[in-house]
Image: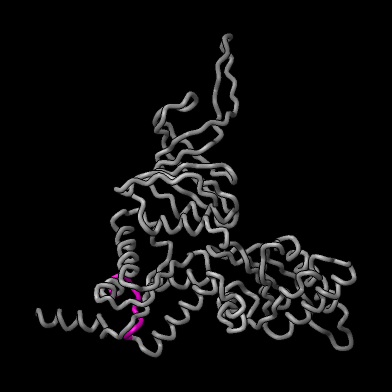
Amino acid sequence: MKLLNKDIEKDNAGQVTLVPEEAEDMWHTYNLLQVGDSLRASTIRKVQTESTTGSVGSSRVRTTLTLSVEAIDFDSQACQLRVKGTNIEENQYVKMGAYHTIELELNRKFTLAKKCWDSVVLDRIEQACDPVQRADVAAVVMQEGLANVVLVTPAMTLLRAKVEVTIPRKRKGSCSQHEKALERFYEAVMQAILRHINFEVVKCILVASPGFVKDQFYAYVFKEAVRQDNKVLLENRPKFMLVHSSSGHKYSLKEILCDPAVTSRLSDTKAAGEVKALEDFYKMLQHEPDRAFYGIAHVERAADALAIDTLLISDKLFRHQDIQTRSRYVRLVDNVRDNGGNVRIFSSLHVSGEQLTQLSGVAAILRFPIADLSDAEDDSSSGED
């Protein structure tokens, strides 16, 4: 994402002009947009024209519209973003108040205006425009007959390809059918890697499986690379890393990113940091439950007591359409930061983010234990009776 212009007043109203440069930037834009914002962007509109003879024709014209946002639709697999709203600026093709849907395009600038830019949204812009934040980890999670090729970016986990091949069992005295099917499977996975992984950007490719599937696949890939003289694979051989996983399904990714060997190699990636923070929270919940809180009411009380060391919060909560609810989460984040705590905003498109969403989307690791708040509430209510 490229920031072209930022004009925000003292009362936090203002506008920014951005250019999305890659698919992931659409996810960032989705998190910036809210109902009631105004969006100015280039779009295509079907316009009806009437000639002097009275015949009606239609043509598609490119024009720039300013919409008051009413609905936002994001397709996470295709990374496409559509914004529906009413036109609020005079235009030669579109009447004031007419509905239109803009599909934001890569490398075309747009201007987003808000009545209030809060700290979370401004942080999101900073993160999106940071050139270091890119898809630097790829993973192939596999088992016999099933493989998922996944890109782990700082903001989301993208499933790029799913390979499924039926592999017959070994038969007494003959393994040829089994071996042929395995070879076909390995070839399909290798082609998926070459098609979907950009080796210039990716720093590390994790190959994970139960048993020896990963080792056999690794051996097959580089045997084929030598035979075909595939320079891309041979030059990037050091980037491949073999790790154990319990299955070939996508959810095993969390377990892979927790592996100490993997975390040491990926120590600078945001995804690995999120997984580690969630792992620390679960350990704390198990061993010292008075220092691990989740649920907005409990976490807010811990924040008021200046007890929060690390706040874990899902970006899904900041997309809430109710302004008061959204500002409640923003206040919590600002409160924790002002008191020297760490804030980790989890992407709901990551495996770790999905897990945090199941814990209400907000959790905290505390500096010091606080007696269980639910017990305190019960005591106070019985005292009132």
Q: How many marks?
A: 0
Identify the colour scheme used. one colour
Which quarter shows the C terminus? bottom left
Q: x, y (%) of residue 299?
A: 31, 73
Residue 43 vertical placement versus 322 (above, below) = above
Residue 165 figure quarter? bottom right
- In this orientation, which residue lies closer to the viewer: 378 or 37? 37
State which region is magenta: 290-298
The answer to whether residue 376 is seen in the rendering is: yes
Task: Decide if residue 307 is on the left or right side of residue 263.
Answer: left
Task: Decide if residue 113 is on the left or right side of residue 174.
Answer: left
Task: Give the residue drawn at x 25%, y 85%.
Answer: 371
Task: Give the residue drawn at x 42%, y 61%.
Answer: 316
Residue 157 vertical placement versus 79 (above, below) = below
Residue 365 figure quarter? bottom left
In the displayed orientation, state which residue is furthest to the top: 53
Task: Decide if residue 383 is on the left or right side of residue 49.
Answer: left
Task: Decide if residue 37 is on the left or right side of residue 23.
Answer: left
The answer to whether residue 36 is seen in the rendering is: no
Q: x, y (%) of residue 306?
A: 27, 75
Residue 74 vertical placement versus 188 (above, below) = above
In the displayed orientation, state which residue is furthest to the bottom: 287
Task: Give the residue drawn at x 20%, y 82%.
Answer: 376
Q: x, y (%) of residue 192?
A: 74, 64
Magenta span includes 79: no
- In this orientation, which residue lies closer to the viewer: 131 or 295? 131
Task: Give the residue drawn at x 51%, y 76%.
Answer: 275
Q: x, y (%) of residue 330?
A: 33, 61
Magenta span includes 296: yes
- In this orientation, which residue lies closer to the viewer: 183 or 218? 218
